[in-house]
Amino acid sequence: MRTIEHTIGGTRRGSAETLPVYDPATGEVAARVSAGTAAEVDDAVAAAGKAFEGWSEVSLARRSAVMFAMRDLVERHADDLARLVTAEHGKTLDDARAEVARGREVIDFACGIPSLLKGAYTDQASTGVDAYTFRQPLGVCAGITPFNFPVMVPMWMHPLAIACGNTFVLKPSERDPSASDLVASLYAEAGLPDGVFNVVHGDKVAVDALLDHDDVAAVSFVGSTPVARYVHQRASAAGKRVQALGGAKNHAVVLPDADLDDAARQITGAAYGSAGQRCMAISAVVAVGAAADGLVTRLAAQARAITVGAGSDPASEMGPVVTAASRDRVASYVDAGEAAGATLVVDGRDLLDRPGFFVGPCLFDNVATDMTIYQDEIFGPVLVVLRVSTLDEAISLLNANPYGNGAAIFTDSGTAARRFQRAVRAGMVGVNVPVPVPMAYHSFGGWKASLFGDTHVHGPEGVAFYTRAKAITSRWPGPATDAAPSLHFPTAS
């Protein structure tokens, strides 16, 4: 059976212990992945530290050239990456191709690193004194990434970190690790020196080793809120710069003046795409007033029409969830929703007996905020509908939720949309757009329990996270004078 190995200092190497990698469409073990130890993490960090000495001194022109080469390679190997994602994650090939494209957009942004790292210069800030600032890389940076986007989420991190002059150690999810190995190979082909990009596979052992390592300067994380909180606290206690993106309960508010057919189509795609395993999936709909009945009817029809099957089958619109445990967890939430009194309009549990990790689209109506199907991040194909009377009630409901990743509103009213986007406490807001993931030249991140740390990922905040500012004050004195030393605090003159 194929064993997926680490990439450390440009060399592939395995571990004594391995973990299973499943094909979610069949439920069978398809490969084994090396389970990294603290010693192997130490070797990867050492390789990255050694590479940093040279890479941090490489010109911006050369770093940009590597990113341009990497961008072209990712585009040429997009189908190869997508097939690896589908085989180990389960999402459809079209969905996987879209993930690769969105990840490549961050490389596009990183290609402009000479402009992104331009400093500021002030001539004659004081008499004979010039002042200027520039940004420098941090050192060895680490990325700890989830299973749901094994290409895109790591690409939110490593292209910018590397373009800024850092070196990188990636710990991808052990559930779908193969894409990261291909990315490492593409970086080598693009001309990136050995040790600048390293991949260590494994589980919590490898994660904790990165969080505690003295020579790791910064940690980027995406995952559930409990783990994001843990990563932020542990890495911060170790003196590291941390950005940790957590879970979500993304809402779509639908007003009576919205185009209900369009809203239902878009919400269906946002709720059930990738079997709901997206941090920006719409998992809660807030139907306002007269919108509710017509919207639920349309959502039910759309959910029932979805073709569920293996992600590699071109006819499939939705694939399986990633593991048997995920399937069973989703089913248990559907059970709990029924027991709590919510109306189960569409029941996807009829697919549980299929080989593989399948559960079909599920839709609940008449959901209350004290139900677990509303309160918890299910991370599966379960959509819940809550009913309120006014937009103000909807905004209050969203703002009371502990998560604040994304929120959307469907309306024809510019006044309502503007009120919503200003009042709602979420980091990303869509107006008639259910999945408001910003382009790479903006930054991605939530509020409240959806983000731990001060900065979002990629875009301008990503550049700021992976660099630190240095301010220079410069004077070139003329001939020596007999003036006495000045002991007062310097001021401009």
Image (cartoon, rainbow, N blue to C red):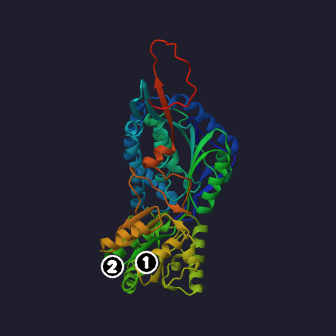
User: 154 left or right of 41?
Assistant: left
Q: From the viewer's perspective, is residue 462 above or below residue 129?
A: below
For label 1, the crowd category at 10 Å Cα-Cα, with few meaning under 14, some 14 to 19 and many 20 or more, is some
Q: Based on the displayed image, in which of its 4 quarters is residue 299 positioned? A: bottom left
Q: From the viewer's perspective, is residue 86 above or below residue 302?
A: above
Q: From the viewer's perspective, is residue 456 above or below residue 338?
A: above
Secondary structure, mark 1, is helix
Q: Which residue is mark 1?
A: 392
Q: Position of residue 456 (x, y in %)?
A: 49, 53
Q: Position of residue 160 (x, y in %)?
A: 46, 43
Q: Position of residue 201 (x, y in %)?
A: 60, 48
Secondary structure, mark 2, is helix
Q: Please give the name of the residue rendered at 46% of the width and 61% of the height, measured from the top-left corner.
A: 427
N-term-proximal mark, 2 vs 1: 2
Q: Which mark is residue 260?
A: 2
How much space separates mark 2 and mark 1, taking CA atoms? 20 Å
Q: Please give the name of the residue rendered at 67% of the width and 40% of the height, measured from the top-left corner.
A: 214
Name the image quarter holding the C terminus.
top left
